[in-house]
Amino acid sequence: MEFAIRALEHIGKNARVFLSHLSSLYSLMVSNFYWTFIAPFKKGQKGLSREHVSYQCVFMGNKSISIVFLVSLFMGMIMAMQTAYLLKKFGVVMYVGSLVAVSMCRELGPLLTAIVIAGRAGAAITAELGTMKVAEEIDALEVMGINPVRYLVVPRILALVIMLPCLTMFADLVGIYGGYLIGHYSINIPTGLYIQKTIDALVLKDIWTGLLKSFVFALIIGFIGCYEGLIVKGGAEGVGKATTISVVASITLIIFADCVLTSLFYFVFV
Amino acid sequence: MVDHIIEVRNLDKSFGDRKILNGINVDFERGKTIVIMGGSGCGKTTFLRILIGMLRPDAGSVLINNIDIVKADEDQLIELRKKFGMLFQGSALFNSMTVGDNVALALREHTDLDEEIIRIMVKIKLEMVGLSGFEHLKPAEISGGMKKRVGLARAIAMDPELVFYDEPGAGLDPVVMAVIDKLIFDLSKKLGMTSIVVTHEMESAFRIADKIIMLYEGKILEQGTVDEIKNSKNPVVQQFITGSAEGPIALRRSGEDYFKELTEES
Ligand SMILES: Nc1ncnc2c1ncn2[C@@H]1O[C@H](COP(=O)(O)OP(=O)(O)OP(=O)(O)O)[C@@H](O)[C@H]1O
Ligand SMILES: [Mg+2]
């Protein structure tokens, strides 16, 4: 009996902590929305710094593009081999191109890119903001009358929302090319036929659902990354912990959101 | 009538069940230099943080230019803070920016001045703290005392009407400290800035203060001019001024309690 009560207490406490995190995360989002869409158009307000956004874009793109290239190239090749294994049984191996293209654009491109960026840019955001927080730099910003959400969070979120879909398109292309390498050189599908099958299979919806996914993933990476950074407590150790939490939480949430979005596209918007 | 820039009323603050500030009532006169003193860990930094609205008190009010900073909304706070400068105890420089950019940040964010003018203003402020020519270094490349001085230059970059200094003298050599003291003194006498200085250095406090406030056990133990504090009969104040280990301020409980605590089974 006592054990049950203690267990309940424990659950209750954790639930409360979780809920309070959720509500602070929500207010971070609201404030981000305000500083992105409302404040810059108010009179007498300093607008968004385009310089900061483009700096963040270059920083994130630069840091991740080579990994995105490698990961999606290999993924395309893997997909080609795996699908060929099955398609051979039915004697329709020329459809490898279709399968690779559709699965890259709808699923693997957005997902893999998001995971790579969560590990690269998301972790970097948390570590950077966390270090600033610990060194009182964020307090210093506030005392100068500079809102940390406007100055630090908004440019990062915007950069992610711009860069992740771009990187995703790049990953789609590279993945399809990886599939072609296997399809052409190892399975001996003629180049023309491979391209033909790829174009035939892809519809516009495959591409925009993928990009919509990557937009949602960008928000997840950005908000989790910034939030975890801004609430860091307790020195370098705290920054390390927060960075781990940030990456793990974003990847988990990304896959969860992927599942929700995919089922929406599958069941609702057919 | 005396013009008060800050009025603090019945301020309470606890961390957990430790009461740090307990019913503080004090006024800060415009254009004066007020020194806050007190033992390490007695809540001076906490008090400053409440004054600038970074920390919410449990009770009480802080009126700055007749606006209650405890209840102020985001826009009001930003407007108020444009008129503040603050030197943090640990400097809190932006490590990713150069020294020059640190000083220039507020100017870039709050004014529409030309980059050329900002550059000149930054040079002037750095010159004031004896650091001209260091614009291009990163905070990691300068010493702790230099960071303090850059922090000071950053705090006064916007020519604020109210500047908070959290231990400006810590980590500086006596000569630089005297220069900084003179700077604080001049800023308040010539430009009419109000300075609120937390310091442990008695000499420097006596040099710059128009008024000294002594915090002890969460309350204001004594306040007055330099002479009033020097001649105070209060044993705690006297112990603090003379810096002796013997007296009413004890770092630990009596020897007997201490022995009991050490030998006690936990
Ligand atoms: N965020 C916090 N959470 C819990 N306790 C805190 C927090 N900040 C400060 N304290 C406690 O409040 C007390 C006062 O701290 P404060 O930093 O104001 O001291 P101080 O007077 O500035 O000391 P010093 O002269 O050493 O800088 C300390 O005992 C400290 O442990
Ligand atoms: Mg302090």
Image (cartoon, rainbow, N blue to C red):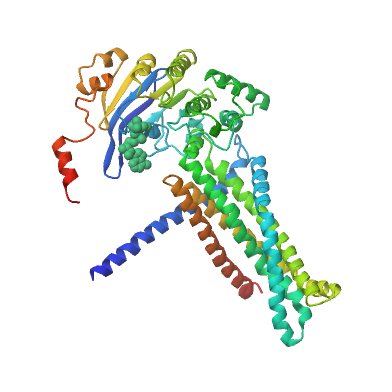
Q: Is residue B239 left or right of residue B180?
A: left
- x 39%, y 38%: residue: B55
Residue toward you, B136 or A115: B136
**Vertical placement of residue A262 versus A171, above or below:** below
Relative placement, left or right, of A268 versus A189 is: left
Residue found 72% across the figure and 74% down from its top? A80
Residue at (66% x, 58% y) in the render: A67
Label count reads 0
Camera-nearest residue between A47 and B173: B173
Q: Is residue A36 visible?
A: no
The answer to whether residue B235 is above or below residue A126 is above
* Residue for point 67% across, 59% down: A68
Where is residue B102? Give x, y as percent: 56, 31
Report ligand 1 position as a quadrant.
top left
Image coords of residue B224 (percent x, y)? 29, 17
Whether residue B30 appears in this view of the structure is: yes
Vertical order, B73 against A256 (above or below)? above
Q: Quadrant of the N terminus of chain A?
A: bottom left
Q: Residue furthest bottom?
A: A90
Q: Using the image, determine if residue B258 lies above or below residue A267.
A: above
Residue B81 location, x and y as percent? 49, 31
Camera-side residue: A20 or B7?
Answer: A20
Quarter assignment of residue B136: top right
